[in-house]
Amino acid sequence: MSAHEHPPHAPAFPDEELAGLVHGLLDGTLTPEDRTRLAARLKTEPAARRAYVKAVELDAMLQKEFPAAASDSLPDDNTLEKTPASDATRWPVWAASLAAILVLGLFVYLPAPRAVPGSARSSTTTSRETTPLARVTRLPADAGTHNGKPLVLGQEIGIGPLVARNGPLQLTFNCGAVVTLGAESELHLQSDMQACLTRGRLRAHVPPQAQGFLLTTPNSSVLDLGTEFGLDVQTANRTEVHVIEGMIEAQSLATKVQGTSVQVRQSEAIAINRKGISSVPYDPDRFVKLFSEIPLNPVEGLIHWSFDNTIKNRINDASGRHPLWIRQMDARENSPHIPLVPGVVGKALDLSSSEPSFAGSNSHGIAGSNARSVAFWVRVPADKTPTNVLNGLIAWGMWNTSKKWQVMLNINPDAGQLGAIRVDVADGQGYIGSTDLRDGQWHHVAVVCPGGPGAKIGTHTRIYIDGRLEKPTGASKTDIDTAAHAHNARTITLGRFVGYVNPQSKMGFFKGQIDEVYLYDDVFTPAQIQNLMHRNSLD
């Protein structure tokens, strides 16, 4: 820690329950029920909000001093290195100043702009500064730069300063938060859950799945209890906050008035300066508007298996060009029977039979390090033992040359969260989420990879469970290089481990149900993931 940095005071939690809830959120171990409990307490208890802000500031400072990195050497299928919950599963965040705007968007959902196929897909590299955190989704002419380089519409950008010369310039963060900058503004991206506005104006909207999104300014702390607000950093010593929707609690961090706080409701505004906090005229028109999703390009390269369109022993996709067939174990012949059960929408594929089976296709998956997204519903039996050894939910590529793309359930507790979604590109080289899905309930899963030259599984993979961005519990720095079209490459399969080679073994098969599978050769935006989950459509 430099001589100019002073850690925030340790938070004084009102009770042990709150301390456990806050630490669980920071460590990435909070259950959905606990998250709801924490949100309720933050909404109604000022003391809880103050302790929460202090905890986030302290955690951020520690993350800056002791950053975590993905491992170079990762284990095979049984020894994938685990990232401790107290280390890299936390948000990789830090305080850019003694100021924070903690946004807990709890109520309203606003669609984010659509992905732009191919416009800047190759712009990402493996450096820490360019690990994808957000996508540029609105960009006027000569709008600005990121890390000193001109911005491109659709570009995935990472850590570093973004300077908006012209506005409106809009970003959609991986978590789903949407930020629109006005002209002559500067925003420093720090993680997919944090950024710092150092000058200018922005308007922010945080949907429910982005709860915990953090913004910083030079002189204030604002806890947002609604979903939309405007922020105006006029000088290093003066910030204005205009609440457009919901409610916030603001706190001055000036030395003489530190700890002073006030609640600000919808259609109210405040100024925060060295003297404290005061009311100012509410003026939402000074902030550039947020833009809803606009289709910039038609969605191409999309495969959708609904399991509602079957002809004899064939499962058709929406286009009719990528059919699936059911096979049992390593049988060469297609099964005449398609196991279907009621699903989330219509019928679902049932792979829970005692006789292992899977769905195979003649379709090649996405090759190399090209962008890709997969989304589906899955129901995993409520079995707390790792019985689904070497299972595969959706997979393709070369299993024996470490050039595969496989989405599966993690079955190794030393690798990461047991029962969480795991994405592998080589033997044990992958990325593991944090939610155990073994509860017998339907869950929506989305895996997104923006790809690009030098893309690595540990930095260029995002997992969303039930619409919420996951924190990783295991990750490697292995290159993504899927051999989809190589000789002997496995075509797309559902329900079988890509490396299955023993026709006498019943291991390697998924036991459960799968519904509404989408495969896309670009990036699903957070809004599109919400649409798939709630409306079974990208639009």
Image (tube, rainbow, N blue to C red):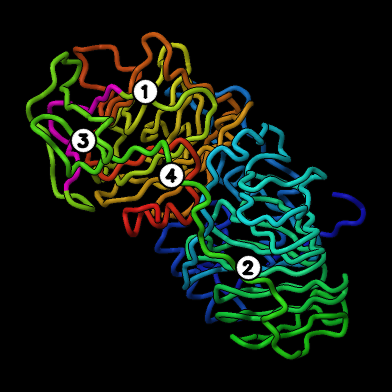
Q: CA distance from mark 2 to mark 1?
A: 40 Å
Residue 354 in magenta? yes
**Which sits earlier in the primary sequence, circle 3 or circle 1?**
3
Please tell me which residue is depicted at 82% across the width and 63% down the height of the picture: 184
**Which sits earlier in the primary sequence, circle 1 or circle 4?**
4
What residue does disc 2 label? Answer: 204
What residue does disc 3 label? Answer: 316
Question: Label 2 crowding class (10 Å Cα cut-off): few <14, some 14-19, many 20+?
Answer: many
Residue 121 in magenta? no
Q: CA distance from mark 3 to mark 1?
A: 16 Å
Query: Would residue 493 appear left or right of 396 to someone viewing this image?
Result: left
Please tell me which residue is depicted at 67% across the width and 81% down the height of the picture: 284
Which amino acid type is shown beneath numbered disc 1? His
Is the residue 253 above or below the residue 24 in the image?
Answer: below
Q: Which residues are drawn in magenta?
A: 347-362
Query: Would residue 25 appear left or right of 337 to someone viewing this image?
Result: right
Q: CA distance from mark 1 to mark 4?
A: 19 Å
**Which sits earlier in the primary sequence, circle 3 or circle 4?**
4
